[in-house]
Image (spheres, helix red, strand yellow):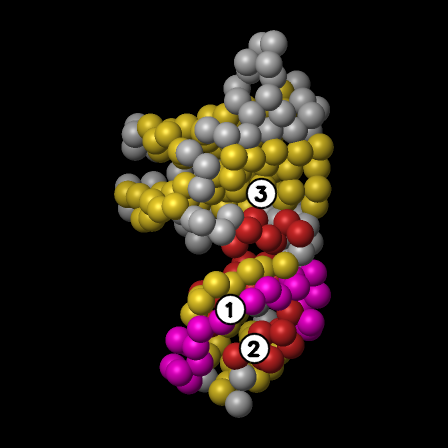
Amino acid sequence: KTNYGEILNLKLQDGSTVALNSNSSLTYYKNDSRKVWLDGEAFFQVDKKIVTNAKFWVVTEDLSVEVFGTSFNVNTKKKKTDVFLEEGNIWLKLKNGVDKKMIPGNYISYSSKKNKILEDKNIFNPIVKTSWKDGSLLFENLSLTKAMEKIEETYGYSIVFKDDESKNTLITGAVPITNIDICLKAIEKSVDVIILKEGNNLIINKK
């Protein structure tokens, strides 16, 4: 289990590695680390078992990911599950019984509550989905609203915009996420806003 602002690198008993993002938890039974339950976000590099061809499973509230050996990112925040496949092949078994095969570069977002696929697209710059594990967030022409959602996920603050113009300002670039103050300064600099911390809120004003 990780706290806000913490990233944990784990090695499972089978040799697979997991980077666990902030405010997330990973659960498995002692005798079987090839089936894990994820709440939050994690990047998996699953060790392929060539002799036994044993599967690896990641289970979330919305779906299960079935894997032999591959690298992929799973995020269960915001009441949906997003899966991004970096390399290899995986199968998604959605809660509604549908199976989806993914190929490298695919990004699928599915909500079992809404019983639908919210997004299904190819991503040409994979680092956008996985840069968090190296301690930074990469924004590519993202609205400040969406960018601040990521900060909210990482640190648990509530975001308050004082004007609509700031919300739609686009941000491009990388910001460090291991230190909230440096992170906010980097955002302020790149989009000309002032961000104030007040209790559990981040207040955003136009400069």
The spot of residue 195 in percent (x, y) is 58, 80
Whether residues under marks 3 and 1 lie with C-beta atoms below 8 angstroms apart, the answer is: no
Query: Start and end of the magenta stretch?
Result: 163-182
Pointer 3 residue: 42
Dot 2 lies on which element? helix
Whether residues under marks 2 and 1 lie with C-beta atoms below 8 angstroms apart, the answer is: yes
Whether residues under marks 2 and 3 lie with C-beta atoms below 8 angstroms apart, the answer is: no
Could you classify mark 2 by the number of other residues whose Cα lies within 10 Å: few (under 14), some (14-19), or many (20 or more)? some
Label 2 vs 3, first from the N-terminus: 3
Could you classify mark 1 by the number of other residues whose Cα lies within 10 Å: few (under 14), some (14-19), or many (20 or more)? some
Pointer 2 residue: 190
Left or right: residue 68 compared with residue 99: right
The spot of residue 100 in percent (x, y) is 34, 31
The disc label shown at residue 172, or none: 1
Left or right: residue 168 compared with residue 17: left
Q: Residue at x 33, y 28 (%)?
A: 99
The spot of residue 93 in percent (x, y) is 38, 29
Q: Residue at x 70, y 65 (%)?
A: 179
202 in the magenta segment: no
Dot 3 lies on which element? strand
Instruction: Report the amino acid beneath label 2.
Output: Ser
Q: Residue at x 53, y 90 (%)?
A: 207
Q: Is residue 171 above or below residue 52?
A: below
